[in-house]
Image: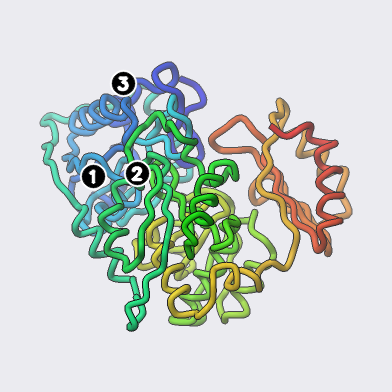
Amino acid sequence: MAGIFKAYDVRGTYPDQLDEAMAHKIGQAFQWVLDDEDRACGNTVVVSHDMRSHSVPLVREVIAGLRESGLDVLDIGLATTPMNYFAVGSLGAVGGIQVTASHNPARYNGVKFSRHGARPVSGDHGIPLIEEKVHSGDLPLAAKPGKLEHGDVFDAYAEHILSFLEPPTDGRRLKVVVDAANGMGTIYKPILERMHIELIPLYFELDGTFPNHEANPLKLENLEDLSAAVLEHGADLGVSFDGDADRSAFVDERGEPVGSDLITALIGGELLDRDPGRAVLFDLRSSRAVPEYIAEHGGKPVRERVGHSFMKATLRKEHGIFGGELAGHYYFRDNYNADCAILAVVEILNLLWHGGKSMSQLVAPLERYAKTPEINFQVEDKEGKMKALAERYKDAHIDYLDGITIEYPTWWCNVRPSNTEPYLRLVLEASTREEMEQRRAELVAQLGEPV
């Protein structure tokens, strides 16, 4: 079972790494991460799951473990991860658990956790504590098992999301292609149909085997069908959701993918125009254009390490208005500081309606530098490789917020170990395409061929 407890969730292959027995223990161990502040919110944990066939037996055992520990359970059934966060926040629950492996392939499954107010389960009191209790068997049973209730939050969630929509007064509709990738974004169709858009749905059939393509919009090959559909239909925008619909990626009217870091800047600028002076978070893989744009819009740019638990905690600590990650997670103050892919869609629609520009025109002022996508390398000795980079570039400004970030005036890169897969990941940016390509070749020579 080693290796399934990650920095901010549980993730592994089913059933060899994560099976029903482990799910049961994880449910029992959840009691340990709830503190007095959580317990003041009552005794109910919101539980839900994605469309993978093995999510059903796993969630059943998570629920059984929770109840044996004395916690009550509100089972909201098939739901996106952001719907689970919304339920926790809006219902004042003690915490939440979503059974999902997000964007990972069909053989994977996992568990995502939150505390009251959709706060992250993180740090030493988070996933490492759950792991310790599971492996030590310190899983006390309550004298009386918790209750189980079933509920539905979809209608309340739809109203919450649509409350942020600002359609134009002239009734003009945008044409939008949405690729649900056979994942949980499929269940958003009734919400999308109420967004004053001409919706062109792609792969809106729930299927945890992902028959059309992987539900990972960070990989450009998974956006190819979306780009083709945008061009075929003459659409204004393309949107792709990941497996549990907590991430979204965007394609402009030319079928060109837009970096999620640039989407962070655009949405941050939009929200700052309404509420100036606030902090906007960006992860350390983001283009230098992002903090520049946030500052230009009167905001306070805040750099953070990768991972939803870190982003949410810092957003709350900084009293920020919004944050975004290169992977397509977008965090909103007015959504319990939690990530919400469909709310990002709403804000991009608002920008398109009221900005008087196409998507590519909105993005153009942010295309200031030449940047690679995230590049993966399979490396045995990750720490050794990062130390070698530090020695090779010792005249740079170097920090270790997440992996190693190496900065020079005209280029920078970040190399970090993946929290979910056996890779080192590289992101590189330079002032010109020529230098970017030169530095990319230089780094590939040191890290090995990309996978």
Q: Secondary structure at mark 3?
A: helix
> Do residues under tags 3 and 1 come within 8 Å of each other at their CB atoms?
no
Q: Secondary structure at mark 1?
A: strand
Residue at which label 1 appears: 46
Eyeballing the image, is 392 above or below 15? below
Q: In the drawing, what numbered circle is on residue 256?
A: none
Instruction: Kindly identify the amino acid type of the residue bearing the numbered disc 3.
Output: Glu
Can you give x and y, in whole percent of width and height, for residue 52 in the image?
A: 34, 31
Eyeballing the image, is 201 above or below 350? above
Report if residue 400 is visible in the image. Answer: yes
Residue under the image location 39 percent in, 42 percent down: 203
Numbered disc in front, either 3 or 2: 2
Nearer the N terminus, badge 3 or badge 2? 3
Q: Secondary structure at mark 2?
A: loop
Drawn side of residue 117 relative to residue 414, left or right: left
Distance of mark 2 from mark 1, alpha carbons? 26 Å
Residue at which label 3 appears: 20
Instruction: Kindly identify the amino acid type of the residue bearing the numbered disc 1.
Output: Val
Residue neighbourhood size for the residue with mark 1, other residues' Cα within 10 Å, grouped as few (<14), some (14–19), many (≥20) = many
Residue under the image location 31 percent in, 21 percent down: 20
Q: Quadrant of the C terminus?
A: top right
Drawn side of residue 258 relative to residue 149, left or right: right
Residue at which label 2 appears: 204
Distance of mark 3 from mark 2, alpha carbons? 29 Å
Residue neighbourhood size for the residue with mark 2, other residues' Cα within 10 Å, grouped as few (<14), some (14–19), many (≥20) = some
Nearer the N terminus, badge 2 or badge 1? 1
Q: What residue occupies the far top of the structure in this picture? A: 16
